[in-house]
Amino acid sequence: MKVEATEVDGRKVYSVRAFNSGVATWLNRLPTLWIEGEVTELRRQQRWASVFFTLKDPEDGACLTAQMPRGQFDALELDLREGERVHVFGRAELYEQRGELKLKVLTIERFGLGAHLAALERLKRTLAAEGLFAAERKRPLPRFPRLIGLVTGNDAAAKKDVLTHIVQRFPPANVLVAETYVQGPRAPASIATAIGDLCKRGADVIVLARGGGSFEDLLPFSDERVVRAVAACNVPVVSAVGHEQDTPLCDLAADVRASTPTAAARLVVPDINELRETVVRSREALHRGAHRAAERHAQRLAATHDRLGRAPLLALERRRATLDTLHARLGALSPVATLERGYAIVHRGDELVRASTQVETGDEIDVRVADGTFGATVG
Amino acid sequence: MAEPTFEEAQHELEAIVTRLERGDAGVDELTKLWERGEELYRICATKLEVVQGKIEELRALEERST
């Protein structure tokens, strides 16, 4: 259809209808494509020729109005639920009467398990590359948490499980519960917000608890927003989501993974009975230790005292021994010892005879040997 | 002179004993050193007895309270 303009004061002017029609023609040249999004605001009525819904971007909430002939929609037998993720095959079209853009839908495919898994795998690789799952990021849980933040569904059995076991193990525990959606399209944002809120309110450990469920049910716990919130949380996070065999991505980002809500309770609080026993044992050890230390001091003192008792006598003995040695050495130097070896001392009167020239034949001399003195005449 | 602590007294006592045992103390000093040693021993022994007594006392008290 040709778009006609009228000439007004040398200016080309188009009617609204003509403009819309022109835009519609342009839009029709765009290719038909697959678009991924969440189905919201699905409106279907028997008397309408078309089914309407809004296709929403799960990441940033961007919206697109979609329309599909009711007969074709019903033939697909999809039984779509609010928030379900789908692939839509269609093309852009202008609702000319109102100048509104919409997606003319040709077919819809439920976002299959395979597609989910592939998307999950991509996200996992991206987050792992950023280091969000790194072992060195894991923090130890506080031994005695002051305030435990619990993120869980409002009537979830998981909530009751965690609470019961926490209180059983450690009655003085303080728990702050943040009830959130734990499945469906609103869950990721509300879980992420709850984690941040609990941090702000002073929780020093956070437990994410959700019972088992289908793969789709647990998907919010693999949502990028939730995983990032867990990683960014400034206190340790325990992830107790699903059963042993499930590994939602939040498990990988959490500091500790608990296989069940009960296990999570065991991780975040100590067992008060064990604590009591430890305290009793410590007290006994304290008594024994104090006693032993005093004993050791007493023994050391007794040993020292023994040595002190013996030491002066020993010292005296040693002195006496030295004295005896000296005395012996002194004795060795006395002339008596020399005489005993057979030498003699010769006097002429008072004069000590040191040389043969001092005496002449016939001189009377005194000879002293070891046991006495005798007179003699020089021959 | 202020009374020495247990550790100070014990340290001095052990120094005296070592000196006596090494034998380099003068004979005139022997008696003085020995007397000082005995005095230090009494100081240490008294302190130990007091502490041991306290430990026993506290323990008895604790056991009665539980």
Image: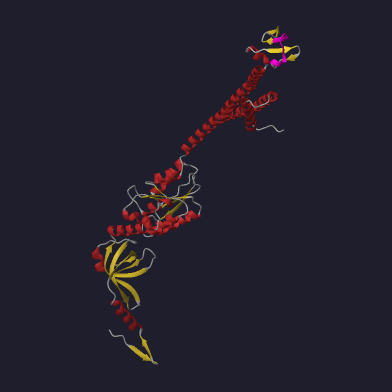
A99 shown above or below A82: below
Magenta residue check for A185: no
A365 shown above or below A215: above
Task: Tell me where residue A298 appears, x and y as whole percent.
Answer: 59, 26
Q: Magenta region: which residues?
A: A356-367
Q: Nearer the viewer, residue A266 or A54?
A: A266
Q: Quadrant of the N terminus of chain A?
A: bottom left
Task: Using the rendered view, name the quadrant where residue A168 is placed.
Answer: top left
Residue that sits furthest to the front in the current view: A361
Residue pictured at 37% horizontal, 46% vertical: A260
Residue that sits furthest to the left in the current view: A75
Q: Is residue A333 left or right of residue A272?
A: right
Task: Tell me where residue A333 appears, x and y as whole percent.
Answer: 66, 18
A94 shown above or below A356: below
Report if residue A19 is visible in the image.
yes
Residue pictured at 76% horizontal, 13% vertical: A350
Magenta residue check for A363: yes
Residue pictured at 28% horizontal, 70% vertical: A33
Task: Tell me where residue A91 appears, x and y as whole percent.
Answer: 29, 72
Task: Using the rendered view, name the quadrant where residue A192 is placed.
Answer: bottom left
Q: How many marks?
A: 0
Residue that sits furthest to the right in the current view: A350
Q: Is residue A13 left or right of residue A148?
A: left
Residue that sits furthest to the bottom in the current view: A9
Q: Is residue A203 left or right of residue A10?
A: right
